[in-house]
Image (spheres, rainbow, N blue to C red):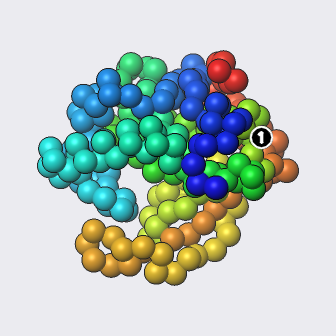
Amino acid sequence: MSSLTTSHWSRHASALLENEHVELHPISEEDRGPVRKIAFDDRIWTYFVSRVESDADFDQFFDAMLADQAGGKRAVYIIVDKSTGQVAGSSSYGNLSEADGRLEIGWSWLGVDFQGKDINRWAKYLLLRHAFDVLGAERVEFKTDVLNLQARAGLRKIGAYEEGVMRSFNPMPEGRRRDAIYYSVLRAEWPSVEEQLGGVGRAVNPCA
C-alpha cells in the first residue's frame, strides 16, 4: 500500500505539528514563495535525486510536492523556524504501508542558513512522535546516500538503527548510481529514542 487511501492514516498523516522551536504544516500553494527564497543553493541538493538550479526546476520540484500531497503519495510538510518565523525547509512521510504499520520519513532538506541549528532534529522528533503515537506505526524508516556522511551521522544521533546498504539503488543527476543506506526506528525502540530527543522541545498539539 503506497498511498494515503486507508482510513486512519488518510485522516491523520497530514497534521499541524509543532513545539516551541519549529512548526510543521502540510504543504499548500501559499508556501511556494517562501520555499523559493531558500531553494536556490547547490549545497542543498548535493545528495538529492533532483536539482533546483532554475525557476523551471523549482516550479517542477514544488509542483511535484503539491501533486504528491494531493494524490496521497506523500504527506509533505513545510518546516518553519519559530525563532525567525521563516520557512526553513521540508520533510515528508512517504512509502506508507498502513497494513504493514510501516512508513518512511524522507525527502528532507533545509535551507543553508537553517542547517546546523537543531531544526532537523526537532522536525524528526515531531514526525517520529506523530508516526508512533498518532498513526500507530510499528516501523519508521529512513534512507540516504551512502556518501552523505552528515545525514548518516544525524540519523545515528537521533537514535535510528543502521540496517544496511541497497547497492545501485537509483540514478543520480550527475550520472552515477546511488548506493542507499537504510536506517529505522521500531515501536519498541521509540520510548528510548523519545527520551533522547524529548528534551529538545515540548510538543504542542501532538494529536492535532
Q: Residue furthest right?
A: 188
Closer-to-camera residue (204/11): 11
**Number of numbered labels in the structure image:** 1
Depth order, front residue of 163/55: 55
Q: Nearer the viewer, residue 64 or 202?
A: 64
Rendered location of residue 107, percent (x, y):
45, 50
Where's residue 86, x and y in %? Answer: 35, 24
State whether residue 150 appears in this view.
Answer: yes
Residue 28 picture location, percent across and down: 38, 28
Q: Residue at (63%, 36%) from the top-left corner?
A: 10
Q: In the visual, does 155 lie left or right of 36?
A: right
Relative height, residue 131 to residue 149 (above, below) = above
Q: Is residue 130 above or below residue 83?
A: below
Q: In this view, does 87 lie to the left or right of 69?
A: left
Q: What element carries label 1?
A: loop
Q: Residue at x 58, y 54 (%)?
A: 2
x then y, percent, for residue 151: 49, 57
- Horizontal relation, residue 133 to residue 146: left or right: right
Instruction: Give the quadrant of residue 39.
Output: top left
Quadrant location of the C terminus in the rendered image: top right
Whether residue 128 is visible, yes or no, is no
Tag 1: Cα neighbours inside 10 Å, few (<14), some, or many (≥20)?
some
Quarter in which the N terminus is drawn: bottom right
Q: In which quarter of the image is residue 184?
A: bottom right
Give amino acid for label 1: Gly
- Give the residue at x 62% y 51%: 96
Q: Residue at x 24, y 28 (%)?
A: 33
**Label 1 belongs to which residue?**
136
